[in-house]
Image (spheres, helix red, strand yellow):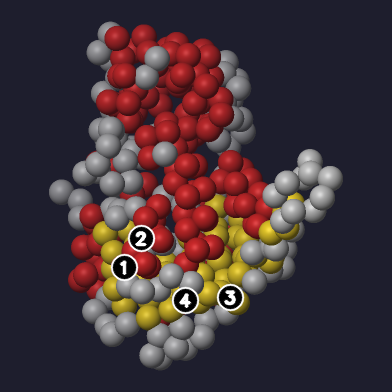
Amino acid sequence: METQEQFSHYSVMLKESVEGLAIKPDGIYVDCTFGRGGHSRAILDKLTSGKLLAIDQDPEAIEYAQNNFKQDGFEIQYGSFEQLKDYCEARGWLGKVDGVLIDLGVSSPQLDDAARGFSFMREGPLDMRMNPEQGLSAKEWLAQVDEKTLAQVLKQYGEERFSGRIARVIKEAVQQGHLETTLDLAELVKKASPKTEKNKHPATRTFQAIRIAVNRELDVLKNVLEAAVAVLSPGGRLSAISFHSLEDRIVKQFIRDQSQMKDLFPDSPVQLEVVEPILKKVGKPIFPSAEECKENPRSRSAVLRIAQKI
């Protein structure tokens, strides 16, 4: 039986994302996606009397933190980072947090553990839940979703060109009882795809789309960005790493929208109320170095964006 210790995790853009927080030794920080603690460790190394709250909804990540992060100033919170505002409010931290870090990638231990059902390269149950104790598994979701909705999910969340064709094949397999494992799904998608992209498994987009739907990832991202603004202090930093264009678009648009002055009544002939910008963009988007991409190919699609609360 495989244990979580067998699966190593590489924290993407570790140095750049932590530097983006402009850490104060006595500050208050939140790592919204603990994983295996790479970013948390780097933040803690820069703190003296400061505090770090780490959040994760994966029970294995919580267990890892409890076993390996026993030090003053560190606390691990089991749950979704969608509840960031609630967690900070409970600690009296609203408007007092100096930095929030969000790494939106699926952690390597989750991908590498076949039993979690994230990988199209390994035989495992069709699960894909970030928190295996909550919600529907991918298999359960595929059994109840209709073909039209599935096709829309594959197109919107996976940017899959052959979404209709793949959705039809998946639903046929579900009805026939032929869809049980990750490799069953990967093989179905492979056969249903008339063309393949160079150096990309044909099931990549489908697995991404189903995972996003099962975990409500884009809705959760929008909510945590709003929460981050609420918990940050003036001058506090947001450091967000996304891994595909849908996520990055949401982060980019959120920072842009919060950086602009808003007229709440644009059609009124009299200027009634103008909302001042809440954030300012810090620098340009940062991409992993060629060296990092070579060392960890999973980092190739990552984008880091940094913003500061005004």
| Residue type at the position of mark 2 | Asp
Residue at point 52% right, 55% down?
226
Mark positioned earlier in the residue sequence (3 or 4): 4
Q: Residue furthest bottom?
A: 48
Q: Which mark is residue 86?
A: 2
Query: CA–CA distance between discs 1 and 2?
Result: 6 Å
Which residue is identified by label 4? 96
| Residue type at the position of mark 3 | Pro
| Residue type at the position of mark 1 | Ala
Query: CA–CA distance between discs 2 and 4?
Result: 14 Å
Which residue is identified by label 3? 234
| Residue type at the position of mark 4 | Lys
Q: Are marks 1 and 2 in contact (CB under 8 Å)?
A: yes
Secondary element at image label 4: loop
Residue at point 34% right, 53% down?
80
Which residue is identified by label 1? 90
Image quarter of residue 74? bottom left
